Image: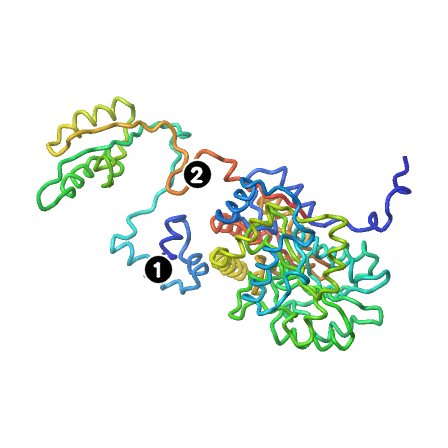
Amino acid sequence: MDYEKSLNSTICNVKPSGIRKFFDIAAEMDNVISLSVGEPDFKTPWHIREAGIDSLHMGKTWYTPNRGLTELRKEISKYYKRRFSLEYDPLKQILVTVGGSESIDVAIRCLVNSGDEVIIPQPAFVCYEPLTEMAGGVPVVVNTKVEDQFRLTPEELEDAITDKTRVLILPYPNNPTGGIMERDDLEKIAKIIIKHDLMVISDEIYAELTYTKDKHISIASIDGMAERTVIINGFSKAYAMTGWRLGYALGPQEIISQMTKLHQFCIMSAPTTAQYAAIEALRNGDDDIENMKKEYEMRKRYIVGSFEKLGLSCFEPMGAFYCFPCIKSTGLSSDEFCTRLIESKHVAVVPGNAFGESGEGFIRVSYCNSLKNIQEAMHRIAEFLQELKDEG
Amino acid sequence: MDQLLKLLSENSDYSTEELALILNEPEDYIRAQIKEYEEDGIIRGYRAIVNWDDADEKLVSAIIEVKVTPEKEIGFDGIAEKISKFDEVKSVQLVAGSYDLSLVVTGETMNAVASFVSKRLSPMKQVISCQTNFILSNFKEGGVILKNQDDAKDNREFVI
């Protein structure tokens, strides 16, 4: 049978994720240390798991309202006020989704008409481009640079805008670089966004993991931006709840109500057990975040310092749980570096170009692993670099 | 909790250089701090956590619950210190509950442990009674899981 005729051509033409290959190699090996996955090594804090279990004991096994439990939306609203000084009406401006990823998909589909251009700063999380294409939009990539700390500059943004531009994706704190946008940076780009009447999808899933003195600042808190911003966040990274699949979108009522309609028809409601656990996370989880963050910071200092000592320059990450060292000095491409590293030393990291062409010459190293494993991995990387030198 | 002690108690294999990076302190400071802990007897030594169950050399261990008569002035300290001197005794703890001292005693065979208890421990004049509980299997020691290798494996999936 000729499936090509039966399948949707837009979907068939979407490039598969470039990270998969390394996972397949790693799966065949023993004694692999993975510094490649984008999820916390911590387990969900016990009191949060218990709240999920309790809800099952109480027989809370039905669908929730489409938008998510009212109680949960109220807690999300309080949380955004408490942590980021932003006000969202729990009844009209919040939608609870299956992970932050569903929110991204639904937001793009609600904001993009066929042929609209969507600006995506890269290196970035791999979903934005394919989701834009599947919504009929045209991704326009902006390559951010290490010398700008991987921030989106006003000049780059202005250059990328055409009369077809409708949406800017703002992926900060950034996966894979660890870059962030500070108030000053946001104010500069906000002027351009307002001038060209664009919408922003601000993916803030790593907001809690910001290592600067000032906490994460959302672009929605810049004057005139709340009305044109959809914030994406969720529970996966901050509370180590990846497997619960729970995220949310915050935004103007007019957008959230359309997103809710789409979510209602394709998902109905996010997992009920996860929603009860999330209420507990928001009510009593601030200390858990703080403790995990402290641990991430120790690992970050160790891993960044170790790369510097090994002679690979490494941009100081200010958010998320990745570092993004430059491997150009080895003379290898990102792909060659990662393939040889896993084959000879059984350490898995991800080539930077998996996150966009501008990631070529870099590798993404996740510090979601115990210090002990990171230590062992860094010793192996040191051996690997020495062997490369001896060869050359 | 002191972060340096916490790190070393989890893994004593860090170099001074590595600890300096992790804790964001100068190497000299870390070196001096460790020396001070060693001199003050806060750090008493560094050793490997051995899973004896899987090693070629088998050892038998037992937890001994000991009831003792406390002595004037020194209470339980005198007898606890005396018992600590035996090489066969690996740990001694004073506990609150239905007995007073909890010991771990190790020997090459069950007989060796039993004979230590009956010939050396029980005859001591402060000892009222000993109950011997042989350890059958070790699942976790010093915070390290010994049995379930699955837990040690990284089971996270590559999703994207």
Q: Where residue B6 sits in the image (x, y, percent)? A: 38, 53
Is residue A293 rendered to the left or right of residue A104?
A: left
Side (left or right) of A247 relative to A48: right
Q: Residue at x 29, y 56 (%)?
A: B37
- Which mark is first along the chain, 2 or 1? 1
Residue A96 place in picture, x, y as percent: 66, 54
Mark-to-mark CA distance, 1 and 2: 30 Å
Observer able to see residue A329 = no
Furthest-left residue in this view:
B72
Q: Residue B78: where, in percent of width, then height?
A: 13, 42
Say left or right for B110 vs A387: left
Q: Residue at x 54, y 57 (%)?
A: A282
Are the residues under badges 1 and 2 in a single subunit?
yes
Residue highlighted by disc 2: B145
Q: Nearer the viewer, residue B73 or A299?
A: B73
**Residue position marked by numbered label 1 in the rendering:** B31
Q: Chain of mark 1?
A: B
Which kind of residue does numbered mark 2 sit on? Ile
**Element under label 1?**
helix
Viewer can see residue A40: yes
